[in-house]
Image (cartoon, rainbow, N blue to C red):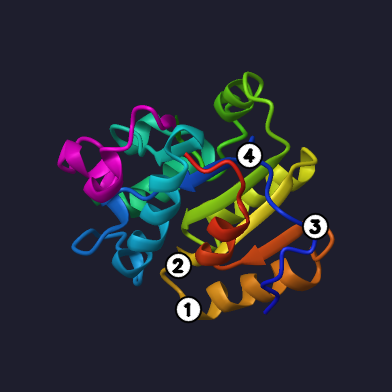
Amino acid sequence: MATALRHGPIEASSLHVCVDMQVLFANGSPWQVPWFEKTLPRIEMIVGAHTATTIFTRFLPPNRPADAVAMWRRYYERWRCVTLERIDPGMIEIAPELAGYSPPAETIDKTVYSPWTEGRLDALLSRRPATTLIITGAETDVCVLATVLGAVDRGFRTIIASDAICSSADETHDALLKLYSTRFSEQIELATSADILANWTGRE
């Protein structure tokens, strides 16, 4: 697995996108993600060092399956137990270890895997001068994947904190790390959270 920052130091204006680190994916949830809790301290290190340049995303299920469209309606028929009419409202919130950083960290909501589809992330980034995005969060092979590919398509230098992403499936987590570091080796860099912090200039 590649860990070197081949394109050099991380500029001060870079932004950290923390994907869906919500109670909804913590232990005890129907959607619990193994390694969620072990990933949290590394993410908190990055958020704590660069709070004002962090953006949290939240994945929001519909109130009920009938409120979803097309195949999403079928999906939530399967996962009715996590619709908003069934779950504790607190489950959609950012994990308590991270929630206190917002504000100044910003939060955007989305109803699909990608934070780009509904335009909220693009709108927020249009107000920021960043050319680099650091990505952490859950899940490696679903919402993190969608976030990363959107960043690549938009031409951002894209750095994934390899030890600060997690999935509910180890096999596809490992496969995605290999994919990121091979097929996307010119556009995606993998680095540990410690390497990212050591190379990100202009710490708060």
> Percent position (x, y) of residue 52?
45, 32
Q: How far apart are marks 2 and 3 (CA)?
A: 27 Å
The residue sitting at 53% across, 81% down in the picture is 171
* Residue range highlighted in magenta: 82-108
Q: Do the residues labelled 1 and 2 touch (CB within 8 Å)?
A: yes
Q: How far apart are marks 4 and 2 (CA)?
A: 29 Å
The residue sitting at 46% across, 74% down in the picture is 169
Residue 88 included in the magenta stretch of the image: yes
Q: In this view, does 175 lie above or below 13?
A: below
* Residue 203 makes an appearance in the image: yes
Along the polypeptide, which appears first: circle 1 or circle 3? 3
Along the polypeptide, which appears first: circle 1 or circle 4? 4
Q: Do the residues labelled 1 and 4 touch (CB within 8 Å)?
A: no
Q: Mark 2 points at which residue?
A: 167
Considering the numbered disc 2 on the image, is that residue within a helix, a strand or a loop?
A: loop
Side of 177 where 26 appears, left or right: left
